[in-house]
Image (spheres, helix red, strand yellow):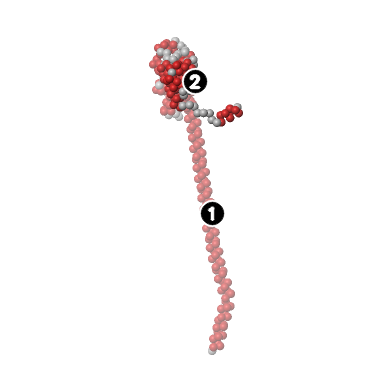
Amino acid sequence: MVLWERNVKTEVLYLLLKQLPSLTKVQPMETTEAEEGEAGGEEEAAAREREARAQASIKEREREVQKALANSLRDREKEREYHKRDEAVQHFNALLADLVRNPDLTWREAKKQLKKDHRYSLAELLSKDDKERLFGQHTSALASKRRDKLRALLGELGVASTQAWRHVRALLAADPAAPVYCSAAQMEREFRDYQRDRQSAAKTALRQLLQETRSISHKTLAAVRANAAAEQQVHDALKHDARYLALDHIPEERQQMIMGYLEELEKKGPPPPPTATEPTRRSKQ
């Protein structure tokens, strides 16, 4: 009985060992197919991701191109509008130069005259404010030219800065080259401005003369205070210069300017000594 059981067990073990090769072959095949399926899915996902990135890049590039094109078109349109406006300004300025020659003309008066000219329509791109501004610039330039002409004529006539207006007015009335003003009062204002400017220039010139006079130093004021003759010496050093004589009509103010300059020099003290490099530089020259 024991022998029979042992034979049966041996038989079963033999059958199991016989089937073992087939079992060992099946299991690896099933694992390989799963791995291949998983790898294939990853490749497909990666391909889809690459495709999505490529499409997104293309769309982004398209947006950039469209934006650049829109900016270019907008800039081109701005440039075209600028040139059209510039042409309108040139046409309107030419119209002003031909029709408006009186600097005293008002915009309301000038506008009626300008509208009668066919060239007025060439400036239709300009607003009312633009036209009025250009008109103001034009009349200001005319007024400036008229003022310069008057001042040049006053200089030619030898009009002094102290001369009375009634005398100057008679001179201008007799001269055909005199510019035209809307009123005598307006011309007188221009003359008063001319006098003030000349006097201011004369004072500046006197100060320049004082700076050029070597006999005047930081010690001069003390000398003037100590001795009245020193003050006369200052005037003697200046009186032959036209810049000094130009203020003969206001001697007191001229004296104040001279004394004020002497006080400035005294406060500043002696000039700084020459630098150590000065002798070397002069010796090389």
> On screen, 73 above or below 172?
below
Circle 2/circle 1 CB separation < 8 Å: no
What's the amino acid at mark 2? Ser
As helix, strand or loop, the secondary structure at mark 1 comes to helix
Q: Residue furthest right?
A: 284
Residue at 46% from the left image edge and 19% from the top image edge: 206
The tag on residue 205 is none
Q: Number of numbered discs present?
A: 2
**Residue wearing tag 1:** 50
Query: In the rendering, at what x and y percent does residue 112 appear?
Result: 41, 22
Direction from residue 272 to residue 182 in the image, left or right: left
As helix, strand or loop, the secondary structure at mark 2 comes to loop
Residue at 58% from the left image edge and 74% from the top image edge: 21
> On screen, 219 above or below 59?
above
What's the amino acid at mark 1? Arg
Please indicate, yes or no, whether residue 139 appears anywhere in the rendered image.
no
**Residue wearing tag 2:** 215
The image quadrant that residue 132 belongs to is top left
Most foreground residue, 269 or 64: 269
Residue at 52% from the left image edge and 46% from the top image edge: 61
- Where is the C terminus found, in terms of image quarters? top right
Most foreground residue, 231 or 14: 231
Most foreground residue, 75 or 177: 177
Q: Residue furthest bottom?
A: 1
**Dot 1: few (<14), some (14–19), or many (≥20) neighbours within 10 Å?**
few
Q: CA distance from mark 2 to mark 1?
A: 94 Å
Query: In the rendering, at what x and y percent does residue 5 appear?
Result: 54, 86
Query: In the rendering, at what x and y percent does residue 172 appear?
Result: 44, 12
Please indicate, yes or no, whether residue 133 appears anywhere in the rendered image.
yes
**Dot 2: few (<14), some (14–19), or many (≥20) neighbours within 10 Å?**
few
Direction from residue 193 to residue 9 in the image, left or right: right
